[in-house]
Image: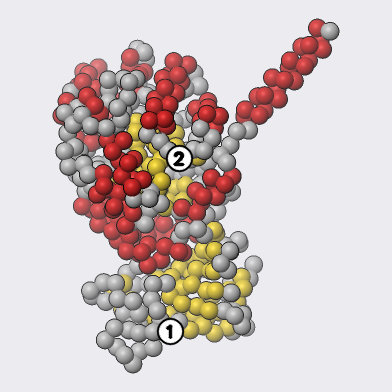
Amino acid sequence: MKLKAVFFIGVFILINSVVFAQLKNKPHLEEDFMDMGFGIFIHWSMDSQYGSVISHSMVGASEEYLNKYMNDLPKTFYPEKFNPDEWARLFKLAGAEYVVFTTKHHNGFCMWNTKTTDFNIMNTPYGKDITGMLFESLRKYGLKVGVYFSPEDFSFLHKQGKVISRKGEGTQVTDNPELLEYDKKQIDELFNNYGPIDMVFFDAFSTKPLVQWVHEKYPDIIVTRGEMQTPEQKIPNGPMPGPWETCMTMGTQWQYKPTNEVYKSGTDVINKLIEIRAKGGNFLLNIGPKPNGEIPIEQDERLREVGLWMFVNNEAIKGIRPMKGMIKDGDIWFTQNEEEQAVYVIITGEKDWFKGFRRNFLLKNLKATPQTQASVLGQNDLVVEYWPENNPKTKFEQHNDVLEISVSRAHRLYNDKIWPNPVVVKFMNVDVIK
């Protein structure tokens, strides 16, 4: 009898552990996430005042440095120009569907009104709940709300008397039970007091206990990092199974960098968005606000350039999936909306494409049918401004083994009439050659 009891207890524990280990994001939430395609990442903390790397300067720092960092820096953090509505409007204009905000980075400084620690935004001269204000504005403009949360916490480790590090004994929730419970209390505050939360990005080397806890307690919140692949500062060579998300900076640093910074061009950012979507991923594009709460002009400019492109071409980016077996042909990328039988041909790498001029391209993997239709997104294919004799209609001709398309960029988007960014041709009812 004792052996049987032990056997059944063992089976019960095994079954429950398997069930626990298999908790995942809900499939329909993952599909919704893949539809969104484009999000904004925000790295911001009180050490933005010096433009240093966010949080990581605490690792290897002297006790004197840590004392000044944790006790003096909060006393001068005063983002008096923070305007959450202005931020949200800009993100909406940029074409984003969701925003992920650093509620707590590795330093442990909380950007919300928390009861778990005094190391938070309320104990600064600003004294306002930035997280609550921003989340309210994001929802006001129809943007999904994402929480970036670091389970690692340098200020907490310091209180425990541990050497601050991202690797080593006691730095992760898997080997620091007190830290795990502390994080759970903070997540409860964020999810219960600032909801509804749509997604959470856990940034740590070991997150499984928190991820499983969230799946149990908050099953309608999708976990990105911690559950899915989230390549950082790089794009994978090809499609990856399931949902995935590349996060990337506009320059070289996540947080605001006032000096020695080099930014990507707007065209480069747009091309990266296209590549990521053609490969089936989401693009989480990072900004780093200034310590006074403003978005740096260089970042504002690039968001608006992306926004103009998305205003014209968003249907090639949102609600799409990668083409099976065909994501690229030369400098041309492909996405598709299977439900609408639409294929998007995204032409990159074309320089100095003057308004009203026509260019031809050969497509090896598409074949026209009697029902095929083609048009350039954003334009009516009927008229070129100041050039009435120009017929800009998109044309195509099926040859034996290639589909030839003739494209006129007729839409005037810049005053100098030269458009430097990709043009998208939409095909309806076209066969895909696999």
Residue type indicated by callout 1: Lys
Q: Quadrant of the N terminus?
A: top right
Residue at screen point 52% across, 29% down:
217
Q: Circle 2: is it few (<14), some (14-19), or many (20+) Cα within 10 Å? A: many
Task: Name above or below for residue 6 compared with residue 206.
Answer: above
Residue that mark 1 sits on: 393
**On the rendered structure, is 184 left or right of 421?**
right
Please state which amino acid type lies under the numbered disc 2.
Met
Does the image show residue 161? Answer: yes
Q: Residue at x 30, y 61 (%)?
A: 305
Asked if residue 305 is positioned above or below residue 169 in the image, the reply reads below
**138 w.r.t. 48: above or below:** below
Q: Quadrant of residue 341?
A: bottom right
- The local secondary structure at tag 2 comes to strand
| Residue for point 56% across, 39% down | 25
Is tag 2's residue or tag 1's residue first in the polypeptide sequence?
2
Closest to the observer, 156 or 261? 156
Label 2 and label 1: CA atoms lie apart by 43 Å
x 30%, y 27%: residue:
113
Question: Residue 99's x, y, as percent?
Answer: 37, 45
Select label 2 or label 1 by which is in front.
Answer: 2
**Outermost right residue:** 1
Figure quadrant of residue 355: bottom left
Residue 375 position, x and y percent, is 46, 77
Residue receiving disc 2: 199
Question: Is 225 placed left or right of 16 in the picture?
Answer: left
Q: Could you say where residue 405 lies in the image, as x and y percent from the top left?
A: 49, 80
The quarter in which the C terminus is drawn is: bottom right
